[in-house]
Amino acid sequence: MKKFLLTVIVIILVIAAGLIVFKDTIIKGAIEKVVRDTTGLHLTMETLTVGLQDQTVDIKELKLRNPSGFEDKIMFDFPEIYVDCDVKAIMKKHVHLEDMTIHLRELSVVKNSKGELNLNALKAVAREGEKPAEGKKEPAKEAGEAKPMTWQIDKLHLKIEKAVYKDYSKGKTPEVYSFDINIDEQFENITDPYKLVVLLVTRTLAKTTIAQLANFNLKALEGSVSGIVAGVQEQASQAVDQLKKIADGEVPVGEGVKNITEDTKKSVDSLKDQFKDFFKKEED
């Protein structure tokens, strides 16, 4: 009996050791599958660190590659993606990310020599275009079809630095347009990984003229994430109202400042930048 118990303990320890050694490889494979399913793109990453005790995933230098047929190799360049997740929920086919930080260094939009746009190769973009018209029902699921995995991102911190547009359709030397974005925003309650990809694209292109240059239908995509963006704009509006009350003397400075959270102040800063860009265009 003692020998049997000892054998069981050894087996458990070996399995536990294997999970610790190969946890990064297992999670890396899961991330690659999710990215392929939602974008259709292949990825590379420099490092992936998994914290078992605090249930975190920290990815450095993740890059999503363009499909074949495009002169540039990289579409999305992320210096860091950090996730605080609920591991137990994943076991029940529910991806619950309590806190997520995405830092996008650069989005490279490319029109190749054939006039094809790399953004149109994104599964999330194609999916929005294939949605049934209003009033029509989605196709019924077949009996026995596996239940899809559900998603919940409680808080998303999105930082975007830069966007570049390269047009190779007019010759070997591309026309190049570069835009500094400098977005730092907070979003809440995202329940669709496809909408996360769309959010990345729309928030990046919103402060550029890339959509017009590339003849890309940005408004249709923005409509699909309008509910997510509206939450940020509502927070910003509340903060502006609070600041106005402080300026008018309706609320004491100390109390007013206390009521404005860090997240809201970042949203206000982002909107201020957008208005600054708008007035700059009007002056030009």
Image: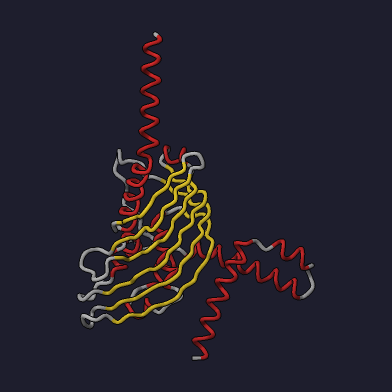
Residue occupying the point 39% across, 16% down? 6
As drawn, is 54 to the left or to the right of 108? right
Give residue 201's quadrant in the image.
bottom left
Q: How is the image coloured?
A: secondary structure
Foreground pick, 206 / 222: 206
Quadrant of the rendered image containing residue 256: bottom right
Q: Quadrant of the N terminus?
A: top left
Q: Is residue 57 above or below residue 160?
A: above
Q: Position of residue 253 (x, y in %)?
A: 77, 68
Most extreme residue toward the top is: 1
Q: Residue at x 35, y 33 (%)?
A: 18
Residue 193 percent across, percent down from the top left: 40, 54
Taking the image as shown, residue 171 lies to the left or right of residue 149, namely left
Is the residue 206 above or below the residue 57 in the image?
Answer: below
Q: Report the label total.
A: 0
In the depicted structure, whether residue 7 falls above or below residue 104: above
Q: Nearer the viewer, residue 13 or 260?
A: 13
**Of 61 and 34, which appears nearest the observer?**
61
Residue 128 spot, x, y in % from top left: 35, 62
Q: Position of residue 243 (x, y in %)?
A: 70, 71
